[in-house]
Image (cartoon, grey):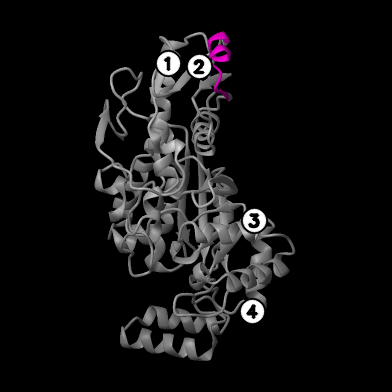
Amino acid sequence: MLLVYTHKITPRLTYIFKHIFVRILKTPLSFTTKVEEFVAHNGPKITYTKAPLGTEFFIRSHSLLFEQGIGEVAISMGKWEDVPCFFATGEQSTIPFDIFAASFYLITRYEEYHPHVSDRFERFDAVNSLAYQHGFLEKPVIDIWAFKLLKKLQEKYPDYSFDTRSYQFISTINVNDAFAYKHKGFIRNLGGFFTDFIRFDFKSFARRTLVLLRIKDDPFATYDTLVSLGKNYLVKTVFFFLFSEYTTYDKNISYSNTDYRLLIKSIIDYAPFGQLFSYYTVKNTQKLNKEKKRLEEVVNRPITKSRQHFNRIELPKTYQNLIDLGITEEYSMGYYSTCGFRASTCTPFYFYDLDYEIQTPLKVFSFVVMDETLQNAMKLTAKEAFLKIKSLQYEVQQVHGTFISIFHNATLSDRKDSEEWRALYEKILKY
């Protein structure tokens, strides 16, 4: 067991130490403020305070973990060998920066609590982040720092055995448009026929006709294939269902549609699932609660996993609302405009509420890449997208972390224009 000496044990301190040592490095630890207990400890130990006690492993502490509330934090970037870092510690410290304060700043999304310019969907944009501005958004620096710290500890304590964890890949599928043509109603299909006609897209016109005449399957009906792929490649595949009223941004078929309800029931028998909360629930707790109850009546079990449509999260309010609803796993932490690690970690972590200074029971699963980002925001071809995903997966594999992707059922449909992306999806599962 690792023992940490500090002059003051705070909720912030215990939270981030446990994330680094328990969740990333699989190392049990305890804390003490008593010098005699620390000196008597025979195992590995770290001093985390303003000055070392002797020649032990020492990291000079920044004030952030001993504060409360949101304040102005001065950040000056540096390097730890080849990795960006900040909160320099001086020459006495075993490592050149306060890894714990820096990790806390990034993982709690401290910067998102400060005033910032949102994008047109009222989201915190990647360009506003420290990680984007200093070129480390595509690296899970908290995990990289943790393993570099481990190496230093192993040099200091070569006889102590540290456990390791395994790389994981979680594929998540957003079902926000369950069918391409079926169950859309007369007006929407009439509009679709008209659009196909004026675009001279006669293949879509013909396919729509054949589906509506029940001669062909709907092109979005590839759910059995997606479930099978996950099982074949031993990749956990989680489906998120939009179950809301029709709005400008939520264009799924009606939640009361019998076939849609049967589709959901057929999928959840074979794969884990969660709820894709609609666009306006980010600021409407009544709507949030109504949608959750509505889906729970269909699946006949509690909903514990969720994602926000358009990945709209407003910290800390969105997460506080989800906790009140009994959600325990949240999958919206990521950016639309570009790929990368929004919280700078590839390890699922518990949301720390800076309003109340507590670790909450809400576990955050931060996604790294989304199909719409690759296609629309970054304008990549399927081949270019594979190379980008491969490089991000490599970063996660190096630290034995968890790689999480988002694909939409529409992207993986049976349409001709989706062939390359379906092939890409299977390729990354295989890789």
- Residue on which disc 1 sits: 57
Q: CA distance from mark 3 to mark 2?
A: 38 Å
Snapshot quadrant of residue 257: bottom right
- Residue on which disc 3 sits: 304
For badge 1, the amino acid type reads: Phe
For badge 4, the amino acid type reads: Asn
- Residue on which disc 2 sits: 45
Q: Is residue 109 above or below residue 345?
A: below
Left or right of 25 in this view: 275: right
- Residue on which disc 4 sits: 257
Image quarter (top left, top right, bottom left or bottom right) of the N terminus: top right
Mark 2 neighbour class, 10 Å CA radius: few under 14, some 14 to 19, many 20 or more: many
Say what secondary structure mark 4 lies in. Answer: loop
Between circles 3 and 4, the one closer to the viewer is 3
Residue 149 location in percent, x, y?
A: 41, 23
- Residue shown at 43% from the left, 69% from the top: 415
Dot 2 or dot 1, earlier in sequence: 2
Say what secondary structure mark 1 lies in. Answer: strand
Dot 4 or dot 1, earlier in sequence: 1
